[in-house]
């Protein structure tokens, strides 16, 4: 969805307008439930959201910018390779795992 918004996709923008508040409330409840259960630290909601959302959104934005301002390569890598390294479900899951690890209570971080 983030990429579609960057590209100006009207359907994606309409989807976000319609669902953003509801999805935000779902995230709020999930974060509060995790904090109550002790699986993530009790930090302010905006801090936790930033720790989770930014690592997911930035690669999407970075690839979109690179596609617009480079000649198909960045640091010697083809943009398609960069996109495959950053935008797969596996890459997203890894970033989420790293974020949740950073948010884990001090005694449980390895």
Image (cartoon, rainbow, N blue to C red):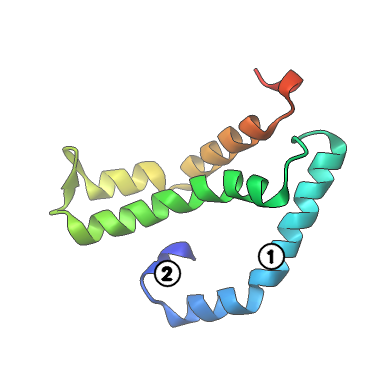
Q: Residues within 10 Å of mark 2 (few under 14, many from 20)?
A: some
Image mark count: 2
Residue 44, above or below 1? above
Separation of marks 1 and 2 at Cα, in angstroms: 18 Å
Q: Which one is in front, 48 or 108? A: 48
Which residue shows up at 75% across the image and 19% down it?
107
Give the number of the disc on residue 4: 2
Which residue shows up at 39% across the image and 44% down it?
86
Q: Position of residue 24 (x, y in %)?
A: 69, 63
Q: Position of residue 26 (x, y in %)?
A: 75, 60
Q: Which one is in front, 10 or 58? A: 58
Which residue shows up at 83% across the image and 33% down it?
38
Give the number of the disc on residue 23: 1
Which residue of the protein is positioned furthest toward the left in this rendering? 71
Looking at marks 1 and 2 on the same chain, the residue that comes earlier in the sequence is marked by 2
Q: Position of residue 3 (x, y in %)?
A: 41, 64
Which residue shows up at 26% across the image and 49% down it?
80
Instruction: Check disc 1 and report its element: helix, strand or loop.
Output: helix
Q: Residues within 10 Å of mark 1 (few under 14, many from 20)?
A: few
Q: Is residue 23 left or right of residue 96?
A: right
Q: Is residue 63 left or right of residue 90?
A: left
Q: Are marks 1 and 2 in contact (CB under 8 Å)?
A: no
Give the number of the disc on residue 104: none
Which residue of the protein is positioned furthest toward the front in this rendering? 44
Q: Position of residue 110 (x, y in %)?
A: 65, 17
Instruction: Check disc 2 and report its element: helix, strand or loop.
Output: helix
């Amino acid at each position: 969805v983030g990429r579609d918004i960057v590209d100006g996709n009207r359907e994606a923008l309409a989807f976000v307008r319609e669902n953003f508040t509801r999805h935000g409330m779902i995230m709020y409840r999930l974060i509060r439930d995790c904090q109550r259960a002790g699986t993530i630290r009790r930090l302010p909601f905006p801090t936790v959201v930033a720790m989770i959302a930014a690592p997911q959104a930035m690669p999407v934005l970075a690839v979109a910018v690179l596609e617009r301002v480079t000649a198909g390569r960045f640091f010697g890598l083809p943009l398609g390779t960069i996109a495959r390294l950053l935008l797969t479900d596996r890459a997203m899951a890894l970033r989420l795992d790293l974020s949740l690890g950073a948010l884990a209570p001090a005694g449980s971080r390895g």
